[in-house]
Structure formats: C-alpha cells, structure tokens
Image (cartoon, helix red, strand yellow):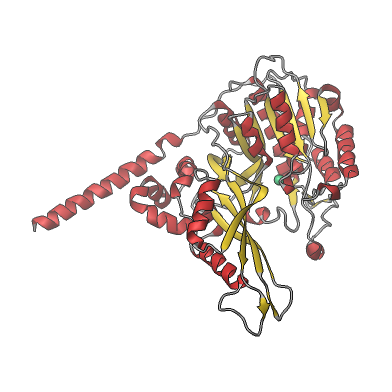
Amino acid sequence: MPFIYTLLALLLVVILVVIVRTFLFSRDARQDPLPFSSELPDLQPDLLVPARHLSAAIQIPTISHADPAEDRPELFDALHNLLQESYPLLHGRLSREVLPGGSLLYTWPGSKPELEPVLFMAHQDVVPADEHTLAKWTYPPFSGAIEDGFVWGRGSMDIKCQLIAVMEAVENLLAQGFQPCRTIILAFSHDEEVLGMGARVIVTQLKEQGIRLAAVIDEGTSILDGVLPGFKGYTAPIAVTEKGYLSLKLTAEASGGHSSTPAPETSIGILSRAIDRLQSNPFPYRVQAVLPLFKALSPTASTVMKMAFANLWLFSGLVRRQLSASTETAASIHTTTAPTIFHSGIKDNVLPSLAEAVVNFRILPGETVAEVIDRVRTVITDERVTLTPLPNNAWEPSPVSPSDGPAFHHITSVVRELYPTATCAPNAMLGATDSRHYHAISDRVYRFTPIVSRKEDIERIHGINERLSLENLSLMVKFFHRLIQRWSCGQM
Ligand SMILES: [Zn+2]
C-alpha cells in the first residue's frame, strides 16, 4: 500500500513539474517592439514600380558557373546598367565600386562616421532553369512576366527580389530626404549560387579598410504561412547562424582484372559498404538545437507542443522521433549526410581498380569539420577507404549572432509592424549563404528574406515556376525602408 502512495506522490510531482515548466516556458517569449520614431512618413510604394524593376532584372539571365570562365560578364554589365537607369538618385548619391567578376559595393556615408556602418546584402546571380522542365513553366524562366499578380521567373524569390527591394527602399529614402546616421553599405556579390569568391573579396576589402560592421542582413529564412505545423498565425524564423559545410571524397582501391574471375571484394563493393554504413548511422540528433526557435514561438504553439519543449527532460525522445521523421526538421537537428557523386567502372567485363564517391555533410552549429571527419572514419572502419576533403570546399558552422540585442529586435519590430500576426524566432539556416564570410567583420549577421511563403512557394526556389507576388514585393520594400532607418539611426 505505501508503495502505491509513493508512486502516486511521485507521479503528482512529475505532473506538477510539467505544468509549471510549461507555464514558465513562454513567459519570457513576449515580443515587445523596440521603440523607434521615424521622421519620415510611411512608404506606400506603387505595386507596379518595383515589379517592373524586378521583371527587367529577371530578364537578364545572370547565371553563375562553377568555372567562372563560363560566366557572361556582359550580362552582369547589363544588370549594372539597368540598376543605374532604375535608381538615379541612388547612383547620384552613393559611391559605387564594381569588383572583379562583377560584385557591387555601394556606400552611403552617414552623418556620424564614428559609428560602425550597417550592411545590406543580396546576390546578383541566379541558378539556371533545368532544360527538362522548361515546358512546365507557366511563363518562361527569364521572361519576367508580370501576370496574375506575380512577377515570374528565376531570381524572383532567390534573390533579385531582395536586391531590388533594398535599392527601391534606398531610392525612396533619398527622395524623402533621409540622411543616414550610420554609414549604409550595400553589397551584392555575383557568384553566391556557386559558393564563389565574390562575397569573400568584398569582406577582404572592407577588412583591409579597417571596417567593422554594426550589423549585416542577407537573404535567408522567410515568413512562413502554415509550414510549421502546430503554430497559429505566421511564423518568422530569422537565421542567426548557418550550418557548416564539408564535401568528402571517398576512394576505394582494389585489384582490377577480368570480371570472369572476380575477387570476393571489389572496389565498388568496398565503397558501397562504406556509403551504406554512413547512411545507416546518421549523425546524432540534438533537439536542443531548435529549443530557442520553439521557445520564441511558444506563445502561438499548441499546448501539447509547448508542454513537450518545456519538458525535454521528459519528452526529448518523443520530440526527437517527431522531428527526425521529416527531412526538413531532421536537417535542423543534426549534421546531414548526403552522398552526391559515385563513379566507378569503364566496361562491363572489367573489374575497376578504383571507386570514388563524394559525400556532402551540412554541419550542425556546435560540431566541427574535424569531428565530422573523425566520426566518418569511425563509422566506416575500413582502412581501404581513404577520405579526402574537397579543396576549398569546407567551412565550420557560423558563430551565433545575438537574438537579444537591438539589431535583432529592430528586425522583429518591423516584421510585427508589417505582419501583426507573425511571431519571430531565432533559428539556423540549413543552406549556405554569402553571409558566412561576414562574421570576420561583424558579430551581428542575420539571414532573413521578408516575404510570406507557403510550402509550395519554397519548392519553387531553384525549381519550376519561381514567382513572387506584387504584394510580397511591396511589403519587402517597406520592410527595408523601415529597417534601413532603424539600423542607421536607431539604438544598436
Ligand atoms: Zn540565394
């Protein structure tokens, strides 16, 4: 009998702890706006003006290539000319520098040169449209069609929209007579899509000039409509870090020879087993990685979800199972393993002496390139398989920028002004962006693209029928019109 009482008492304590922790979990998650009074009237941009500018930019297919020799510099020149024609005030007032390859760097001097500048980024290049999918596009990928309330084409979402929105905002601010306090820098690289050198060259140059930046914003996560299940309203994750990157070449050698007398193990067999071991032993899932995201979103979360995240000491297994069930959420809680290249063999009756594969890893913040290589070696446990990182193709996860300071809260304040039902939260970017280079000259690097996206919209990026609604583009211009003022003249 007393045993049952003890058990009941224990159960009661557990339930109480769960309830109290659930209650306390969202207590600190209130998102009060950071005060800022602008002297300018709110911007009411014409829907069509930025749309026409974006459309014209899309019609110039500034595709970047892994081999820069394949790039067409005349297209980047054409885009630069278009920007000059479209934004005369900007080009009259800001100094402009064209860097080798075609990256653009603009400087708008502030009235307080003693303050660190702020920097707004985007990239000019786009990915090609897959030739096999051309028939499936409603409007051709480089048509820039303005139809059905959308601007259609490559770059409309990734990321000529951000380039145009930033320029549109600056042009409007100049027309309104705005004078920045901190210097404003605009940086638009030309080869982000091929993990190129453009952003690195810009950062090197700024560093050599002794410039440190108060804050940086680049393309990134967007405002999600129904993408994350279990939350009410829009959710606006703002990426404060991004995953690291490593591509490892795996090589297996074995004796070749005639296929009529094969050895028990061939190079293909050895390498296949190594890849299989890697895929069967995924990197550990770390639910804690998304705790800041879920904590900030908790005021709009379902009770069950709130209870689970507030009590990871009890429910971490359950949460891990839930998150690891889908590829997107799984990628946010562990280092991913993706075999992307596999080569071997030349003829059907010849045993290949060599098999090669490349496996791409996206490294969770908190882990390192060296740890990933060590673990891969341990998991494979086969000395016949050699590991070689692809040259110039590995980097650590980015440092985490603060989500409790003014730079971050200016972003969340503008989001809430323009999208009152949105809840903002810090998170990690799963893909790689140019912004990773900027940690060398700033402690506050954010990745955010202020457009509302549904799941089907996200699939259009690098896919078929990429498009952006005129309304989204207009709100994007308003976002940068407000953020530029806040970051330049507000408390930082
Ligand atoms: Zn992009």
Q: Where, quadrant-wise, is the N terminus in this rendering?
A: bottom left
Where is 402 relative to 244, above or below?
A: above
In this rendering, position of residue 243 left or right of residue 124: left
Whether residue 158 is visible to the viewer of this picture, yes or no, is no
At a point 74% along the width and 34% down the height, the residue shown is: 201
At a point 51% along the width and 57% down the height, the residue shown is: 377
At a point 13% along the width and 57% down the height, the residue shown is: 4
For the image shown, how many numbered marks are present on the structure? Answer: 0
Quadrant containing ligand 1: top right
In the rendered image, residue 39, in percent from the top left (x then y), is placed at 68, 19
At a point 49% along the width and 62% down the height, the residue shown is: 381
In the rendered image, residue 459, in percent from the top left (x then y), is placed at 67, 56
Q: Nearer the viewer, residue 80 or 276?
A: 276
In the rendered image, residue 222, in percent from the top left (x then y), is placed at 63, 44
In the rendered image, residue 457, in percent from the top left (x then y), is placed at 67, 53
Where is 79 relative to 376, above or below?
A: above
In this rendering, position of residue 195 left or right of residue 369: right
Whether residue 55 is visible to the viewer of this picture, yes or no, is yes
Rendering quarter of residue 355? bottom right
Q: Nearer the viewer, residue 304 or 80?
A: 80
Q: Nearer the viewer, residue 347 or 288?
A: 347
Where is 354 relative to 446, above or below?
A: below
Rendering quarter of residue 100? top right
Q: Where, quadrant-wise, is the C terminus in this rendering?
A: top right
The residue most toward the bottom is 260
